[in-house]
Image (tube, rainbow, N blue to C red):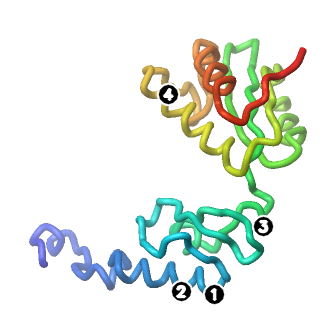
């Protein structure tokens, strides 16, 4: 279908030529997963940004997104060492800024980076979460803060101290998070 506005703005009118045809995108995604030895739990295309539950060639549960596969990022977080099994919260007590964050494996290098940036008060660190649990929890935290009307003061993860009770409540009540011992 040709839209006059598209023609006036010089846009290409063909979905296939512009790389936006869902059938072509799905076919390319499925072919690349086959090349990587990844088996989809259900061979159904869910969209370019949606994780597709699968099992990698080494047997890890994974959820590759077509947009990541097309960029060469690989299908399996465990194979890449990016399992997002740590969630932490750091603060800058001088400026009253709090930041939730995630990482994989040993959190010390990431916490050191934040310390050098002035976020030197480590509020909590939870390690050993199930694969991608920290990633999903971080997304839930950011969504809950947005719903509560708490906007970032810098980037997308730096908030005023007022956000800390909500952040900690979500972390503490997340399945798989073991309460810290004093």
User: At numbered mark 3, what does the secondary structure look like: helix, strand or loop?
Assistant: helix
- Give the spatial CA distance, label 2 vs label 4: 37 Å
Q: CA distance from mark 3 to mark 2?
A: 20 Å
Mark 3, residue position: 79
Q: Quadrant of the N terminus?
A: bottom left
Residue at 74% x, 71% y is: 59
- Whole-angstrom CA distance, mark 2 to mark 1, is 6 Å
Q: Earlier in the sequence, mark 4 or mark 3?
A: 3
Specify whether residue 118 is in view: no
From the viewer's perspective, tell me whether residue 20 is left or right of residue 156.
Answer: left
* Foreground residue among 64 and 179: 179
* Secondary structure of the residue carrying numbered label 4: helix
Q: CA distance from mark 1 to mark 3?
A: 16 Å
Badge 2 or badge 4: first in the primary sequence: 2
Per the image, label 2 sits on a secondary structure element best described as helix
**Mark identifier at residue 144:** 4
Quadrant of residue 142 within the rendered picture: top right
Circles 2 and 1 in contact, beta carbons < 8 Å: yes
Q: Quadrant of the C terminus?
A: top right
Residue 19 in percent (x, y) is at 38, 79
Q: Which mark is residue 31?
A: 2
Nearer the N terminus, badge 3 or badge 2? 2
Q: Position of residue 137 (x, y in %)?
A: 62, 37
Which x, y percent locates residue 30?
51, 81
Residue 35 circle label: 1
- Residue at 62%, 28% (x, y): give it: 158
Q: CA distance from mark 4 to mark 1?
A: 39 Å
Q: Could you give the CA–CA distance between mark 4 and mark 3, rounded to whole angstroms?
A: 31 Å
Mark 1 or mark 3, earlier in chain: 1
């Amino acid at each position: 279908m040709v839209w006059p506005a598209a023609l006036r703005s010089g846009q290409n009118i063909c979905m296939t030529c512009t790389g936006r045809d869902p059938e072509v995108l799905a076919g390319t995604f499925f072919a690349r997963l086959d090349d990587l030895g990844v088996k989809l739990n259900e061979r159904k295309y869910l969209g370019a940004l949606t994780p597709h539950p699968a099992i990698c060639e080494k047997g890890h549960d994974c959820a590759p997104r077509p947009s990541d596969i097309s960029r060469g990022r690989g299908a399996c977080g465990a194979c890449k060492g990016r399992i997002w099994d740590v969630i932490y919260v750091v603060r800058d007590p001088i400026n009253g800024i709090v930041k939730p964050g995630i990482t994989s494996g040993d959190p010390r290098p990431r916490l050191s980076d934040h310390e050098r940036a002035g976020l030197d008060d480590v509020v909590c660190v939870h390690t050993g979460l199930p694969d991608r649990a920290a990633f999903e929890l971080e997304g839930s935290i950011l969504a809950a803060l947005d719903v509560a009307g708490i906007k970032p003061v810098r980037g997308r993860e730096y908030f005023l101290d007022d956000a800390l009770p909500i952040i900690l409540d979500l972390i503490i009540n997340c399945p798989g998070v073991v309460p810290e011992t004093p």
